[in-house]
Image: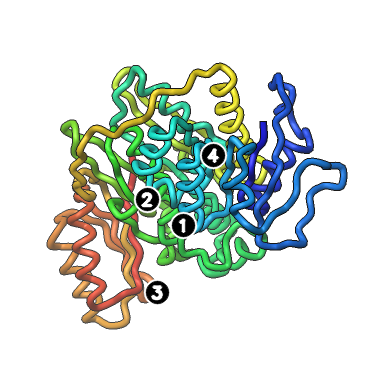
Amino acid sequence: MNIGLLGFGTIGTGVYELINLNKGRFAKNLDEKVVITKILDKDPNKKVAEEDKVARVVTNPDDIMDDPDIEIVIALLGGMDFEYGLIKRALQSGKHVVTANKAVISEYFEELLTIAAENNVILRYEASVGGGIPIIGSLKEELKINRVNEIKGILNGTTNFILSKMTEEGADFADTLKLAQSIGFAEADPTADIEGYDVSRKLAILSSLAYGGIIKDEDVRKRGLSDVRAVDIEMAGDYGYIIKYLGHSVLKEGNQVYTTVEPVMFKEASIMSNVNSEFNIISIVGDIIGELQFYGKGAGKDATANAVVGDALYIINCIKDNNFPKPLVFRKQLDKKGVGAFKGKYYLRVDIDSHETFEHALNAVDEVCARKNIIVSDNRVFFMTEPVEADVFDAMVAKIKEKQSECFYARIYE
């Protein structure tokens, strides 16, 4: 059985090593020889391992798409439009597809599943969420018995690395981001990570699966992390909290979905607070099983390649047994309700440069919560509030930012 690999970067190399160079136990689980025969890469000078006499690097996608001997395509190019086009073309050509592309899956989930079903092929995407954490397969298993009504988690290794370093070393955000970039934990353009798009795409995929209807990235309210400062980490610690970057969705009343990606605070002793660096944690809540938590490396060459090759092995076994899974269909029309279901105490820091700025911030907070603790120090005012609905607090902060844009806030999870 032949496989075509789209992309020979970090993850693609990891997949190639597992399949063609016999790293791990992949080949030991097979009754027949399964190899990658063609690898798409834009660099014509890229070479496969010297001992590999089967695979070759190609620069034209047609060499893979039009090859009738290739039954499975593994798509690891990244990006959106180009890879989406190739995944769609592969499925329409009757080829099974494995991908780790969260952007493509979250945006074109229903369309690609429909095309796969129409062409009697399988689309697998375990590595699109959680890297090496087998969350999608586990979620599907739980859904056979449970109604899942909540998902939350630390879903991005870059932002978790940044917050972990800030907490450990007292460093500021900008310096820690530069460190993350220098050692390969953050991209040269970190926007997708620090502005929440990476997390919201993963949350959209999980929520669509869990709740039975399509949720897209655009449906998830995102609040970035770039406003956090070392003083916020220190102040949170003084109160016994740790700042984390959380994706969270809740299903209510059967079809009402509330979603958010934002910085939050957890008690120092909580499990979430002790998930650090590139590690991720994902929690799902079912009506029968209760809460289940999945922990592991959310990114990295070996962890992600492991998930990708696991999907390929699943497809290979389905082909061998001629036993394909029932096509996934999203039947429910979900009502996306924003963030109104989220409520909690809040931490808020506002930098003040005049008495007018201070009065404006104080009056805005007074309008939404009567009880609060206030600390004024070094041209900053810090608030710890009583429980407030998330949409109300968001609107209040927007009002404060009319006078002072330099502020940070986080909802507290007790």
Instruction: Choose the circle earlier in sequence order: 1 or 4.
Output: 1
- Tell me the mark number nearer the camera, choosing from 3 and 2: 2
Q: Is residue 369 left or right of residue 82?
A: left
**Which residue, given by chain and number where applicable, does mark 1 sit on?**
80
Task: Work out whether 220 lies above or below 171.
Answer: above
**Distance (Cα) linking label 3 and label 1:** 45 Å
Res 378 label: 3
Q: Are marks 1 and 4 in contact (CB under 8 Å)?
A: no
**Residue displayed at 43% across by 34% down:** 119
Amino acid at pointer 3: Asp
Say which element carries label 1. Answer: loop
Image location (x, y in percent) of residue 18:
72, 36
Instruction: Choose the circle earlier in sequence order: 3 or 2.
Output: 2
Image location (x, y in percent) of residue 151:
35, 36
Q: Are marks 2 and 1 in contact (CB under 8 Å)?
A: yes
Res 107 label: 2
Amino acid at pointer 2: Glu
